Amino acid sequence: MTLHCRDEGAGEAVVLLHAFPLHSGMWDDQVAALRARYRVITPDLPGFGKSDGPDDPTACSIDGFADGVADLLDELGIDRAVVGGLSMGGYTTFSFLRRHRHRVNALILADTRAAADSPEVAARRVAQQEQIAAEGAGPVIDAMVTTLLSEGTRTNRPDIVERARSLMSDNSPAALVGALDAMRHRADATDLLAGIDVPTLVVVGAEDAPSPPTVAAEMAETIPDGRLVQLRGAGHLSNLEEPEFFNRALTRFLDWQRAS
Ligand code: MLT
């Protein structure tokens, strides 16, 4: 199954993996900022955006997402890349690192966590799947818009609220159900952190509720060459909420790791 992706620019390849329940369009501002100097690959993970998903959504797995990204890189003739993702994209990045380590030049971990789901989060995912089956994706998307954006964004930036909602609404209910299953069953990646031997940027919105700054700080401290950037005013979707500051952190890191 070939993943759909946007592939722009030239130079060192940078792969950016999207969050749940959005799609690759969430990276438009980052593509615009990087494409003059990097080859930016933004795939739609299976079932999202323009990528097909498996017929049985419960066949989705984060490891399968990571292997799909590796197959995509093969097709594009890319051997190694900077690989990064936000939240679910970060879970996929950890799996990519475990399964395809030799292809990773550097890592970007945005608003994500290495730990597997707690029993409470796993139970919430099952409840969300049941709600989607009963009522469609609308109510789950409404709740996620609230959870994933900071209060400041929700109050003062209706354009960003609408953009987030529209990115979520583009996806089929089956994509959401499949990814909820994939996230619920994903492996814990905490064991990887201390052994990461590539430069790693950890970015977090200061008001990220699902993956708070304390989690990001602990991750950055455990990763030997990890550096942390916290974005004031941003919630969980920090690249959408504070694109200028997110892009500044990203370009500084990318330019630095390329030069070193
Ligand atoms: C995401 O942004 O990808 C989700 O919040 C991840 C999750 O639900 O764990």
Image: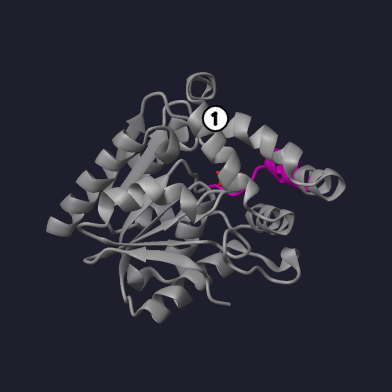
Boundaries of the magenta span:
115-126
Residue pointed to by mark 1:
209
Residue 194: x, y in percent? 37, 52
**Amino acid type of the residue tagged 1 in the rendering:** Ala
- Quadrant containing ligand 1: top right
Residue 217: x, y in percent? 38, 35
* Along the line of sight, the residue nearer the viewer: 61 or 173: 173
Crowding around mark 1 (Cα neighbors within 10 Å: few <14, some 14 to 19, many 20+) is some
* Along the line of sight, the residue nearer the viewer: 110 or 45: 45
At x 52%, y 70%, the residue is 3
The quarter in which the C terminus is drawn is bottom left
Residue 150 to residue 91: above or below: above
* Along the line of sight, the residue nearer the viewer: 218 or 153: 153
Which residue sits furthest right?
134
Residue 260 seen in the figure: no
State yes or no: Cβ of the residue under disc 1 lies below 8 Å from any atom of ligand 1: no
Residue 56 to residue 113: above or below: below
Residue 7, quarter of the rendered image:
bottom left
Residue 254: x, y in percent? 23, 52
> At numbered mark 1, what does the secondary structure look like: helix, strand or loop?
loop
At x 41%, y 24%, the residue is 233
At x 54%, y 51%, the residue is 88
The quarter in which the N terminus is drawn is bottom right
Magenta span main SS: helix
- Report the side of 58 relative to 255 (left or right): right
Is residue 74 found inside the magenta-colored segment of the image? no
